[in-house]
Each structure stands twice: as C-alpha cells, then as structure tokens.
C-alpha cells in the first residue's frame, strides 16, 4: 500500500500547487525570501542543538551509546534567544519516531514536544529536522531504525563514536543509502519514511512556533535521486501540514564541492525553502586552504547557493555552517560567512549549541571533570552581532562590516511604507549602540530578552555597536 501512496505523491509533485496556495505561518515565502506577518523580509539566524532523548543514539540491548548528548533546558533556550538566535533547528531521528515498523513511539514524540515547548517559551521558532549521519545509529551515528536497513547490516556498532569518517564510507552504510534512494523505491523504504514524515508533520501542523520541517539531512547520493525523493516527500509534507514550510537539501556532495547544478524548473511544491550546508574547506584533511584563507575564497559557495535557490524559486536558508574554534583562521572564516550571508540575504542556522563529543564544537566549552559548560567568548563574538532580522521594503544593500562590526541597510526610498526594521543588538552593545537614518540619529528601546530594536527608516539605516 505504501508503494501505491508514494506513486500517488510522485504524480502530485509533478504539478505546482501555486494556484490558490495556502500561506504558511508564522513565516511565508514569496519565492525569493521568507516574509513575516507584516510583509518584511525575515533573515533568520538560528542554531542547531542535539538534544538528549531526541537525538537518538542509545540502545536498549546493552550496547554503549554512540555518544553523549546534552539535555536542553529552559536556561539554554532563553540564552539562545538572548544571544541573538531566533530559531532552533531541532534534529530528530526516524529510529526514535518509529522504532518498529508502523509503531510510533509516543514517549519519544513527547520528548520532541518538550524541546519545541522549551524553544517556543523562549521566543524561538523551530525547524524540525529529520536528521541522519551515516544512515543509522546501528551502523553509523543516527537516523534510520534497524528494520529500515536494507540489506541487514553485517555488524551492529556501538559507541564511543571515534570513527565517524570510517562509518560514513563503510560498505554497510553505502549499501543502506543505495537501497533507500534506489530509483523507483524497490524496497519501499522511501514510502515508509514519507509515511513517518507525514505523521510527524501532522503532529505539529498547527503549532505556532514550528515554521516547518526539513526532509532529510545530508543525503549522500547523486543529485537526480535526491531531487526525486525531495519532490515526493515535499508534496506529502505539504498535504499533512499545509501551513508549514518545507526545507529541502541538495546532495551532501555540495558540502565538498560548494556548488551543485542549478535546477531547470522551479521546485514543484509551494512553501519550499532551499537548505544547503556550507563548510568550505572545513573538512579537508589538508588544512592549507584554511591556513592561507582570504575572504574571496568563501564567496563562491554563497554566491552559488543564492543562484541555486533562485533557480528553484525559493528562499535560501543555510541549515548548517560552522567551524571548530581552534581551526586555523576560524575567526576570519566565521566573520566572512556572516558578511556573505547578509549580502546575499540568506538565513542560517549555526552548528552547534553544545557538544561534548566528536570535535567539541559549539558555543560552550565542556569540562568533563566538573561536568560544567562555559560560554566561549570567541564563539559568542561570532554569533552575537548587529544584524538586520526583519527588513521592511525593497533591499538595495544589506551589509555588515566585519572590521567595524556595523550594519548598513539601504532600501528603495519609501518602500518600507511606515513599517520599521527589526535589528538585533548584542548584549555587549546594549548601552553603546548608535543608529542613524540618512544621517539623522535614531533612538529606540532594546528588548533585554531578545536584543531586538525596531528602527523606522525609509532610506539608509546605519547601526554601530
């Protein structure tokens, strides 16, 4: 039956649902940008968080968990918002949602509910991300349940995760991906996944903080196979949650090539958002490119990402980007990324909030001896900066300068129509920031919980920390 359902979904996906389309909420798409309820361009700045009990990497058969994952607390969510993040990309696991075929785990879904509530109570929006790394916790890191690994694995693995790169390229992981993405879905795996996805989407279809669902994290097969799967899954998602956005990724090959072929036609489902990841040079074994990094090295990936989104006729949201704090030229890499994201009007979600395993990335340093988390001032400086969060009017230029750390936003004169821009001001600049409109000083209160300032300007807005 699920194979029949998938065939129907594929046929439906061949036709755009633009006529009489249902607007999405709380953010909508105009085919180029995300828009808020006041019609302003929404430039999102979010964060990814692996959450204990949600990022499913534990076993009930005595095997060691793949890795340690921190909890998500109310303090975490409030701190995310105070630092300038406005949404949470929340990775969830197929193995958690549906550990047995056709059996949905209500206890697991309740833990996802709790994470969504934590974010919503802090004023954060949420993208629910169907995540995987190396296909499954059973043979890789996270993702599919054991019953959805075809052919069955040669060996079940456990933690600690010290060999992720080897797991990603192992024969059993490669076979599992090939089976899942096989043309025509001969094993029925895509149909099973899409049915699970529909269940997830229906659960949060009307949640006011959930802006949408991401189909599949970092699919590791060719472009054509990924596109066909995305078309089918997106159509099913929109049917299950017609008021929510659908985030879709290209093949994970892009993580290494920094570009993919542009689409020949628009994405066939309304409310879609193009969601590539950007890790230019970061995962190269040879770090020479990072050691010799110049700003112009990083622009092609973002320039191409914008062109790819434009070809799909969707907004651009960089669902992951980041770098290890001790990596060569990490400060320059991050600052240039933010300059480029602003210039090309790309939303983003930083990887990662907290991490006590793998590369020890994230906003916090972890002390295993005392089991304590300490904010890294270096990373806070990266992520917490003056930026335009909502832009009223037609953009001429949106430029953040990494040297002065100041914002210059110019719109077509009069196009804001009396609607203010929303600008984030970091905590460190709460009492020192200055703003001008066409050279005339502006004053406005800063919300201490969100850092937001509303500034009305029909011309050139300049904000300095």
Image (cartoon, helix red, strand yellow):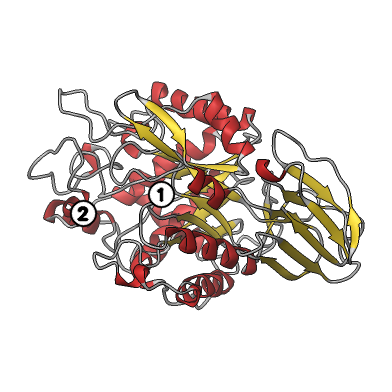
What x and y, as percent, mark residue 456? 88, 55
> Which residue position holds label 2?
165
Name the one closer to the observer, 259 or 292: 292
- Locate residue 372: give its quadrant: top left
Name the one closer to the observer, 73 or 110: 73
What x and y, as percent, mark residue 103? 33, 28
Q: Secondary structure at mark 2?
A: helix
Name the one closer to the observer, 73 or 136: 73
Q: Secondary structure at mark 1?
A: helix
Task: Give the quarter of the figure containing the N terminus.
Answer: top left
What x and y, as percent, mark residue 269? 56, 60
**Of marks 2 and 1, the one in the foreground:** 2
Q: Is residue 69 left or right of residue 90?
A: left
> Which residue position holds label 1?
5
Above or below for 431 versus 413: above
Is residue 192 visible to us here?
yes
Comes first in the chain, label 2 or label 1: 1
Q: Is residue 213 left or right of residue 69?
A: right
Above or below for 253 versus 211: below
Above or below for 120 versus 321: above
């Amino acid at each position: 039956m699920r194979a029949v359902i998938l065939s129907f979904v594929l046929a439906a996906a061949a036709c755009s649902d633009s006529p009489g389309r249902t607007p999405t909420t709380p953010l909508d798409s105009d085919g180029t940008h995300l828009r808020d309820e006041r019609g302003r361009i929404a430039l999102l700045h979010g964060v990814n968080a692996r959450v204990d009990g949600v990022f499913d990497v534990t076993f009930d058969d005595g095997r060691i968990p793949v890795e340690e994952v921190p909890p998500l607390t109310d303090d975490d969510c409030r701190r995310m918002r105070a630092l300038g993040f406005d949404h949470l990309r929340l990775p969830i696991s197929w193995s958690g949602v549906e550990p047995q075929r056709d059996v949905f785990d209500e206890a697991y879904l309740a833990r996802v509910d709790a994470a969504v509530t934590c974010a919503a109570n802090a004023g954060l929006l949420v993208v629910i991300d169907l995540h995987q790394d190396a296909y499954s916790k059973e043979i890789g890191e996270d993702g599919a349940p054991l019953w959805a690994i075809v052919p069955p694995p040669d060996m079940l693995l456990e933690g600690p995760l010290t060999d992720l790169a080897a797991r990603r390229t192992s024969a059993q992981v490669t076979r599992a991906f090939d089976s899942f993405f096989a043309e025509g879905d001969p094993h029925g795996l895509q149909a099973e996944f899409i049915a699970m996805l529909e269940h997830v989407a229906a659960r949060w279809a009307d949640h006011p903080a959930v802006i949408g669902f991401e189909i599949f994290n970092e699919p590791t097969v060719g472009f054509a196979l990924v596109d066909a799967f995305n078309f089918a899954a997106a159509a099913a998602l929109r049917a299950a949650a017609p008021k929510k956005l659908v985030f879709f990724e290209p093949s994970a090959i892009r993580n290494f090539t920094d570009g993919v072929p542009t689409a020949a036609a628009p994405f066939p489902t309304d409310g879609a958002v193009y969601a590539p990841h950007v890790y230019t040079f970061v995962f190269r074994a040879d770090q020479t490119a990072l050691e010799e990094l110049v700003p112009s090295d990083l622009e092609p990936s973002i320039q191409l990402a914008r062109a790819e989104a434009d070809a799909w006729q969707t907004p651009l949201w960089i669902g992951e980007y980041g770098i290890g704090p001790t990596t060569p030229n990490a400060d320059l890499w991050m600052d240039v990324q933010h300059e480029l994201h602003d210039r090309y009007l790309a939303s983003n979600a930083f990887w990662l909030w907290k991490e006590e395993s793998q590369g020890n990335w994230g906003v916090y340093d972890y002390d295993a001896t005392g089991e304590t988390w300490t904010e890294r001032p270096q990373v806070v400086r990266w992520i917490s900066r003056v930026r335009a969060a909502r832009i009223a009017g037609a953009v001429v230029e949106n430029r953040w300068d990494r040297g002065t750390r100041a914002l210059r936003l110019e719109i077509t004169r009069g196009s804001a129509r009396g609607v203010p821009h929303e600008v984030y001001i970091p905590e460190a600049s709460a009492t020192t920031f200055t703003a001008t409109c066409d050279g005339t000083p502006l004053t406005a209160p800063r919300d201490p919980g969100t850092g937001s300032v509303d500034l009305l300007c029909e011309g050139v807005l300049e904000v300095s920390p």
